[in-house]
Amino acid sequence: MRSRLIDTYKELWPLISIDQQHKKLPTLLRDPLPELRVIGIERISVLNRDGEATEDELLLVVSMLDDADQGVRLSAAKLLPEINVIDLHQRVISALKHEQDHEVAAFEILYFKDNPHQEAIAPVLARLDSPLIEESAKTLISLLRETPSSKENFANWNQIVKSVKKNRAHPSLLTLEAILGTDQNREALTRLLDSASESTRLAVANGFASVGYWEPLVPFKNDPTIAPSLIAGLQTRGDLEAFKTLLSLRSTLDSSVWDIAALNILKSIDTRSFLLADDILSEADETDLRVNILMNVWKQSGNRSLSARIAIAKRTIPLLNSKGRSDEALRLLEAYGDGMVDEDLLSLQFHTAILASSWDSAADVRQNPQPWISEWETMKTKDPAAAVVIRQQIIQRFEQQLTQTQSEILGLEQPAVVTEESTSEQEIIP
């Protein structure tokens, strides 16, 4: 009868209107039968995926982490990645501290792998010396990546890891050691990069990559097991030396992998180092690569000062213009709006607008004819057809402002000056 009752609930609940489900769910979650409480959690899961679950219902699911029945707690724990309520991390931490069932605890631990929170380190670390060593270690690695380094805390946590390692041989413990240890500790681990065990080599390399300790990985750049960690470590360090090393590896890497790594490094370094890196690419005649990197860094440079962005712009715009991409360059420049007060960059914007045949944009930057005439004189030899159009624009926009000299330069005929004397002479001529 109990089985039939549960089957009936499973069949009938989806047929109840959403409003009725909202009204009945709190009662269902308090039902004496744990199987029905599980059905209640499953119904909230369905509502949540459809965007129909209320915050109170989701909080009820979280409260079920303390349910007396293991099956109910497991159903609630499985739903954690789909829940977003206030102080959820604290509720999961509290449940994890007291959870006795390993299966339930595993889901609670893994919740923090994808939703890292510093307060979760202690309860997860406490599970390291247990059957949940793999879940705990992987989650700790994720947590530590989001945790500011503290010599005291890292030293204490590293001692716990070393103590666990005496009784348990798991590669992820090596990764934790590499993350938590000092450079001296890491140096001692480098010998394991030559281990016959691929999992051991990978674990150490991953730990080094997490903290940007990439130098020992360079000799293994052709090792398919370690090479990805080298690239990741260079991005973690994210300085000029890391970029120089990455540049030396360009011929050995897939171009898309290299491009992503280069951009990740260069968008994070200070502007001075970035411009030095651009100098290196310029000397190597890597024009296309420079354009790609400069544009991407510029688009993501909102956190840089205006002077830094202007310095990057002065590198980017001439390259785009040389590639016939003046329309694109002009859009980037116009994104500055009224904040752009640099005279050199204004001149560059005017020149770019001329190249893009964006005449109104050019007129917004330069409202007198002389800069236009200078551009026209330059274009006469470079692009005669474009020069003709520029001359037409000058005449159309500035004809009444032109001086005699400017008119002569443009080859315009000057109208005769009419005087009273000439008028009188014309009157007596038969």
Image (cartoon, rainbow, N blue to C red):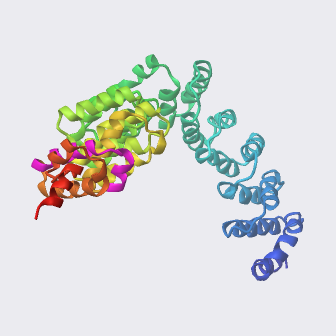
Q: How many marks?
A: 0
Q: Position of residue 4 (x, y in %)?
A: 81, 80
Q: Residue at x 22, y 58 (%)?
A: 392
Which residue occupies the foreground of this view, 349 or 384?
Answer: 384
Q: Position of residue 403 (x, y in %)?
A: 24, 43
Secondary structure mostly seen in magenta is: helix
Q: What are the residue bounds of the magenta stretch? A: 359-381
Q: Position of residue 368 (x, y in %)?
A: 32, 44
User: Extreme top residue here?
Assistant: 184
Which residue occupies the foreground of this view, 348 or 115?
Answer: 348
Q: Is 64 included in the stretch rendered in magenta?
A: no
Q: Is 361 included in the stretch rendered in magenta?
A: yes
193 sits to left or right of 136: left
Does residue 332 appear in the picture of this structure? yes
Q: Image quadrant of residue 168?
A: top right
Q: Position of residue 292 (x, y in %)?
A: 30, 46
Q: Residue at x 18, y 56 (%)?
A: 386
324 sits to left or right of 174: left
The quarter in which the C terminus is drawn is bottom left
Which residue occupies the foreground of this view, 132 or 422?
Answer: 422
Q: Image quadrant of residue 267?
A: top left
Does residue 217 appear in the picture of this structure? no
Q: Image quadrant of residue 37?
A: bottom right
